[in-house]
Image: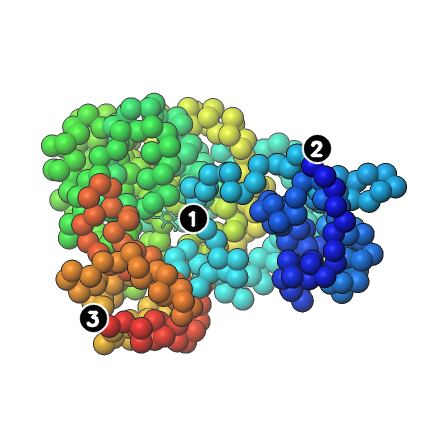
Amino acid sequence: MTKSFRTNLSDWSLAVPVLPQAGPRRVALYREIRRLIETAALPTGAKLPTTRDLAKRFGLSRGAAVAAYEMLIADGFAEARTGAGTYVARTVPLTAASVPEPQRPRRNEAGPLPGELGCSAADERTISIFRTLLNRHLAQPTPRHYHYAEPAGGEDLRHEIAAYLRTARGVRCTADQVIVTAGTQAALDLIIRTLLKPGDPVWLENPCYTMARLAFETAGAAIFGIRVDGQGMDVEDGIARSPQARAVYITPSHQFPLGVTLSMARRVALIDWARQSGAYVIEDDYDSEYRFAGPPLAALQGIDAHERVIYVGTFSKVLMPGFRIGYLVAPQALIEPLLTTRQMIDRFPSTLAESAIAELLREGHFSAHIRRARRRARQARDSLVEALAGSGLTIAPPDQGLHLVASLPEGVGDKAFPARAADVGFGVRALSPMYIGAEQRQGLVIGFSGFEPEVLAGAARRFAATLRF
Ligand SMILES: Cc1ncc(COP(=O)(O)O)c(C=O)c1O
């Protein structure tokens, strides 16, 4: 058995860095002690200082020290011995070093940097309206909030979404076809579970939205990365390589990440092929609310008279990802199978968030919000483009969306840039890892939402100053 030893308080002062002045200090203390245990700086069986000593040494309340120890004990890192104090557990859970790195993007603890993708676009005014709407439901919750609800989502919201999609996006649908989901990701998961089995061939755009690709890869789909050119996904290439594909995932209005629009000829060719082959086309229409110039583009689903398109939309870009509310519009034949699957996953969406969003749409706040958000996004896009002018990056300002792609000079690789940008407080993503198979273009994918234009431009200028081509 490991020999116990008395911890020495002065050693602790070296081992534990200064705890943050703000925020929950018991959590910070818990994390620090846990780190010391996981890295074996505090060996198994070692005696931990008394909570009184710890509190005194780090200027914490005794309660914070007690709470940190309780968390360590609950998680199996420490044990209390009656009358003898608290000790590092004799067998601690798997250490960080022995656990494989998680395959998911790391989050910057301090929040996103200007330039990062996926930042919220809701402004103060919308938030304050939301507060009122949510409070209304919290103050007078209806029986709906206390019960298990319909797997498709509440009728109110489905009705509002269908009306919005018919007028704003040219989608052919009724409220019955709308299924409210926890965002696009959950919609994709639902579709994949319902339609695909491992090994089924699927076309993805190349380059592709990484989270969609992960969903299909995880399901074991046989993925065909279909070339994207100036007219969007090359449908001929798809038909030549995988004529029997079961499904296609596509962002026709604004290809992610390249930003091109699927041409009408390709739309027609895609729908024709899907009709003949019986494939489903999954249309991800994630940012069409942000159209700055040119004619409004209708959704692909609107030209599909054969019920081959499953339309997917989200409130993540137009409001904020935190609501986790999105939706899909299903062809008639898929409604029941999708709802059966949905019940097994998360049963139904949050009725509280749903009710507030339904009212946001019904009371006209949503369209006013979109107008403001679009104006802000355009300003932010212009500030970003201006700040990067003369940097050596080549940028075609996009007519739509919340991100742009900056091309690097010939022969310059893109992978080192995200870290270099983060060093000066700017967020960029490398384009090349978004390709399936061999990388094709090197570039930087940069977002322009969620930050004031001057903040974004300041960060972009700092980054531009580091570039030497
Ligand atoms: C192509 C694409 N689709 C959808 C989304 C939104 O995903 P979700 O609705 O799961 O938040 C994003 C967000 O970054 C995206 O880039």
Q: Earlier in the sequence, mark 1 or mark 2?
A: 2
The image quadrant that residue 414 belongs to is bottom left
Q: Which residue is mark 3?
A: 469
Percent x, y of residue 242: 17, 29
The answer to whether 448 appears left or right of 263 in the picture is right
Between residue 296 and residue 229, name the one nearer to us.
229
**SS at badge 1:** loop
Percent x, y of residue 25: 69, 58
Percent x, y of residue 366: 47, 57
Residue under the point 52% across and 61% down = 110
Image quadrant in which the N terminus is located: top right
CA separation, marks 3 and 1?
Answer: 29 Å
* Dot 1 and dot 2 residues touching (CB under 8 Å): no
Amino acid at the residue labelled 3: Phe
Are there few (<14), some (14-19), or many (20+) residues within 10 Å of tag 2? few
* Dot 3 and dot 1 residues touching (CB under 8 Å): no
Is residue 260 something that shows in the picture?
A: yes
Q: Which residue is mark 1?
A: 105
**Disc 1, ligand 1: is the CB inside 8 Å?**
no
Q: Earlier in the sequence, mark 3 or mark 2?
A: 2
Residue 245 vertical position relative to residue 24 in the rendered view, above or below? above
Percent x, y of residue 299: 28, 46
